[in-house]
C-alpha cells in the first residue's frame, strides 16, 4: 500500500483518471490518504478522514511512508482557522491555504508534511467544540458560491459545507448528503431539533440530494446558489428571496 498527503492549496478529486472528468470532491492542504491504484499520471486514493475515493493527479501530492501515515492518524487533528492564509516552507516559499486545511504535527506554529517543515501563523481549531459553535462556524462560509465537489469558501457544495463545518468543530461526517443521512439519530419533528442538527431533502425519486444545518427560529443555512439562510418548515426549505419552496424535507438527524 502506498500513501500520500496533499501539499498544495486545493486539489481536485475526480471520478475518473482524466482532467476532463467530473470533480466529486477536493483535497485540501495537509489531508492524507491511501493510494489504491496508479494509472499513468493518475492515482486513485481513499481519503483518510472519510474514506472517500477518487482520482488525483500524481504530480499534485507528496508521497508518505507507511510509518508517517499512521503517525498522522494517531496525532491530534489541527485545522487552519482563517478563511484564507498561507504556510511557508524551509525555503520561505509560501503556499495559500483555506479554512479547514490540515496542519499535521502542529506545535507552536510549526508543522510537518513528510520530511518538509512548514510554518503557520494563523488561528487553529482542534478538538471537539460545543454544539452551539456549529452555527458560528457555518456563518464563516456565508455567501460562498455553490460549486459541485467544493469544500472551500471559494466554492462549496451542500454536503461539503456540512462536512467542513462539523470537521472544524471536531466531528466526522461522511462526504455526500446520502451518506451523511445514514449517520446520527432520527428526529420526528422540526420542533425536536436544535441549532446544528442536519436536515436532509430528497428529489422526486426519493433520493436524498441536499442537506443543510438547522438554525434557531426555523431558519436553515445551506448551499443553494451560494451559502444562504432560508426558512424551513414541515414541507421543506422556503426561499426568502423567491418566496417559494425549493427543497422537499425528508428527514432531520441529530449528529451530536
Image: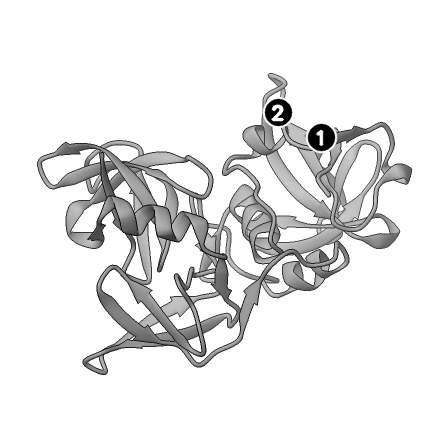
Q: Position of residue 97 (x, y in %)?
A: 38, 68
Q: What SS does tag 2 mark?
A: loop
The earlier-in-sequence mark between 1 and 2 is 2
The quadrant in which residue 94 appears is bottom left
In this rendering, the answer to whether 229 lies above or below 198 is below
Crowd band around label 2 with a 10 angstrom C-alpha radius: few (<14), some (14–19), many (20+): few
Foreground pick, 107 / 250: 107
Q: Which residue is mark 2?
A: 203
Q: Residue at x 44, y 49 (%)?
A: 74
Contact (Cβ within 8 Å) of mark 1 with mark 2: yes
Residue at the top extreme of this rendering:
205
> Does residue 203 appear to the left or right of 50 in the view shown?
right
Q: Is any atom of residue 87 visible in this view?
A: yes
Q: What SS does tag 1 mark?
A: strand
Q: Position of residue 55 (x, y in %)?
A: 26, 37
Foreground pick, 207 / 151: 151
Q: Position of residue 183 (x, y in %)?
A: 64, 31
Q: Is any atom of residue 246 visible in this view?
A: no
Residue 248's tag is 1
In this rendering, the answer to whether 190 lies above or below 153 is above
Q: Residue at x 70, y 33 (%)?
A: 184
Foreground pick, 183 / 145: 183
Amino acid at each position: 500500500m502506498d500513501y500520500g498527503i496533499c501539499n498544495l492549496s486545493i486539489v481536485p478529486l475526480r471520478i475518473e483518471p482524466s482532467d476532463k472528468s467530473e470533480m466529486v470532491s477536493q483535497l485540501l492542504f495537509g489531508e492524507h490518504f491511501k493510494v489504491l491504484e496508479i494509472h499513468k499520471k493518475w492515482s486513485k486514493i481513499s481519503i483518510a478522514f472519510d474514506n472517500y475515493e477518487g482520482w488525483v493527479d500524481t504530480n499534485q501530492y507528496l508521497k508518505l511512508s507507511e510509518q508517517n501515515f499512521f503517525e498522522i492518524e494517531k496525532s491530534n487533528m489541527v485545522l487552519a482557522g482563517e478563511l484564507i492564509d498561507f504556510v511557508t516552507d524551509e525555503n520561505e516559499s509560501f503556499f495559500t491555504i483555506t479554512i479547514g486545511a490540515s496542519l499535521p504535527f502542529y506545535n507552536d506554529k510549526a508543522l510537518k508534511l513528510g520530511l518538509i517543515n512548514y510554518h503557520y501563523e494563523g488561528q487553529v481549531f482542534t478538538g471537539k467544540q460545543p454544539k452551539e459553535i456549529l452555527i458560528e462556524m457555518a456563518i464563516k462560509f456565508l455567501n460562498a458560491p455553490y460549486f459541485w465537489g467544493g469544500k472551500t469558501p471559494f466554492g462549496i457544495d451542500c454536503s461539503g459545507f456540512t462536512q467542513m463545518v462539523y470537521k472544524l468543530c471536531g466531528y466526522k461526517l461522511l462526504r455526500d448528503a446520502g451518506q451523511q443521512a445514514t449517520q446520527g439519530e432520527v428526529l420526528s419533528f422540526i420542533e425536536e431539533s436544535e441549532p446544528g442538527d442536519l436536515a436532509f431533502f430528497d428529489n422526486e425519486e426519493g433520493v436524498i440530494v441536499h442537506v443543510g444545518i438547522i438554525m434557531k427560529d426555523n431558519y436553515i443555512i445551506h448551499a443553494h446558489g451560494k451559502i444562504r439562510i432560508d426558512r424551513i418548515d414541515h414541507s421543506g426549505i422556503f426561499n426568502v428571496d423567491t418566496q417559494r419552496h425549493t427543497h422537499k424535507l425528508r428527514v432531520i438527524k441529530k449528529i451530536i
